[in-house]
Amino acid sequence: MKKSYGLTLAALASVSLLLNACGGNNGGNNASPSASAANSGSSSPAASESAAPSDNGGEKINLSFWTLFDGGDGDNMQALVDEFNKTHPNIQVKNTKLVWGEYYTKLITAVGNGTGPDIGISHTSRLPDLIDQGVATSLDDVAADAGVDWGTFNQNLLNATVVDGEHYAVPIDTHPFIMYYNKKLLKDAGLLGDDGKPVLEQSADGFVKFLDTLKSKLPAKITPFALSNTNDDPYRLWWALYSQLGGNDVVADDLKTAAVDADKGAKAADYIQKLFTNGYIKKNDPDFYKNFQSGTAAIMMTGVWATGTWESTKGLEFGAMPIPKIFDKEATWGDSHTIILPTTKDNDPAKRKAALIFANWVADNGQIWAKAGHIPSKPSVLEKPEFKALPYRSDYVSVADTVKFSKPSTKVWQIRDNSSFKFLNEVWANKMTPAEAMAKMQEETQKILNE
Amino acid sequence: MKMSKLKADAQALLFLLPFLAVYIVFTIWPMIKGVEMTFYKWTLIKKMKYVGWDNYQRMFHDQEVWAAIWHSAIFVILTTPTMLVLAIALALIANRQSRLQKLYRSVFFLPSVLSVAVASYLGLFIFQPYNGFVNTLLHLIGLLPGHQEIFWLTETTLSWIALTLITLWWTVGFNFILYLSAMQDIPDEIKEAARLDGATDSVLFWKIVLPHLGPITKTITMLQIISSFKVFMQIYIITGGGPLDKTRPIIQLIYQTGFRKNDLGYAATMSYLLFVILLILSALQYWMNNRKGADAR
């Protein structure tokens, strides 16, 4: 017996090393903006806190900043913080990187017991919940002092952060749902125009015809349209089409009543379901990012954060564009990263002012942030030569105006995770009719709102 | 005399004190605090509101809770008997005189030492469509036509099968060791005597080996039921509770309610329901063990 344990242990040690290596880089590609951005970059450098210069007077303000960015996003944010600290000797920001999956829980608990940061990050969709819990504070007390001009922001992004007439966050980007295409495969199918853009009629039939041509002209092992079969990305497509049809969120303006527009929702879901059942989308694709990345899929749709990943993929000739106008008007799904000032013990006005100067500066320097693929929140950044020098981005910046944000309900992401995902997944798997799913979503959304 | 006994008790208490202090602060006190939580609307930042028995009332009418309890029970029903059979079978193989005996023992025990995350991700790769191990194997031996795929993780029944297989593969090693040592405790004289009387292998197994494994089987069954009822991680990683929450166990629901929905009071209430269920199961085990002790006399 003794001997066999020795053998067991030795074998185990090697096997578990091997397995750990396998498990490490299996992050779900499409789970979230930040999580997927993690794929694009190598591990970020250890937070290099420059030793604070000691020759400065007593004026210096130190601010703690919690972020949820990883990989490429994490590097870009660190670059922004370093640059800011260099140019603002009186304000020093210390960036603490938290794991995306635990970020909000940690932020809420830390703020709750008075150990939270001076500056934080929030997605626009998370903001109402953070305001309701007393974590995010109104910025209007110090905004004027800090020289923030709200007029310089993209109003569509800004409005999504205004609750009851008060500003609660400084948007630094939007990361909408867009379409990517493989130029080589489109060319093979004769669908690439001379301008390098897809030949595609922007209509419900036009898009299906486009996919049908891809399916018939390209080899069978090529996926016409790479998309995950569950959760985020097909939901985003549904949200986009639902909004294109004039659907206005699944919650009424009073934020207390479920208001799924059953006809529009079912029409959008039915359209997408047919893309699945007619074989344009690979059934239960285990990794649709990889499918597109390895050049075996003609088009794919996901958030703009993938741009950085495709750019660093050797041999992938791709293009980016807004998702087609399939129904009545242009609209897409999107969310924003914003900077918030969490409640602190003393809510020191001097610190809050300094923090807001930082937030505004980050928004002003969106060209650095745009490297990962995000669209900057200030239109003036789009005119900067550094931004224009970045390829692909200009092809989809117009989307910022057509992003349909969700209404400021505190239950936004609960409704998404526990109702919309759940029933729409069944529609994609052809186990539930679109109409049935809409009825269930209405019921479940109301239940969540009542809780 | 009395004084010295008191003194001895006091001395014992002194030695127990460090542990007792830690135990009270980190186990007993949180349990009491947990009961308090069930009577409140309690969020992560402690925005509390006394709600009386509301959480309990809500729980008894909440279909999601009972569905989740049922899913945990399904998992127990699926894994416990299969676990016993598999563990005995492996122990029989490893107990045979053979040159590969040592290899068997190592190989059968090997997966047990993996962490749940590693085992689950392996399971995910094994049952993945298109390039997963199982489907590729089925294609290779021609059981599955080349253009067809089995979607193990998106059909409810297949998901349960996949989850059961992964769990068996991952945890059978421990029970296998228990059975193996129990088999080695069976006196050789008994087996030899049976052989002399002309017992075949199968008679030997059914009449000698299996009855001797009775006590350890009872123990393993109870341990298995309790630990299966607490299943969470592998299901969370492999199916996420899907499709349509049809494989979501009670612990996942508690986790989602507490930390995703930010409703710790209600989550605590569900935890105590689970606590009561496990308490009943443990009491059952205690009762069975005592009865077994009485039988042996």
Image: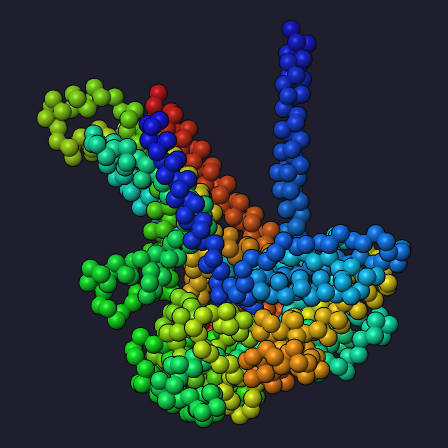
- In this view, the residue farthest toward the right is A58
| Residue A24 horizontal/vertical position (percent) | 47, 54
Q: Is residue B286 left or right of residue A139?
A: left
How many numbered discs? 0
Question: Against B278, is A298 above or below?
Answer: below
Q: Quadrant of the N terminus of chain B?
A: top right
Viewer-nearest residue: B21 or A302: A302
| Residue B96 horizontal/vertical position (percent) | 21, 32
Question: Against A154, is A134 above or below?
Answer: above
Q: Quadrant of residue A86?
A: bottom right
Mark yes or no: residue B8 visible.
yes
Q: Quadrant of residue B15?
A: top right
Q: Is residue A370 left or right of residue A162?
A: left
Question: Against B36, is B237 above or below?
Answer: below
| Residue A83 horizontal/vertical position (percent) | 72, 65
Viewer-nearest residue: A216 or B263: A216
Residue drawn at x 86%, y 56% is A56
- In this view, the residue farthest toward the left is B198
Mark yes or no: residue A211 visible.
no
Q: Quadrant of the C terminus of chain B?
A: top left
Residue drawn at x 79%, y 69% is A357
Residue drawn at x 34%, y 56% is B126
Viewer-nearest residue: B55 or A449: A449
Question: Against A223, is A41 above or below?
Answer: above
Q: Quadrant of residue A146?
A: bottom right
| Residue A260 horizontal/vertical position (percent) | 55, 80
Residue drawn at x 54%, y 87% is A244
Viewer-nearest residue: A150 or A443: A150
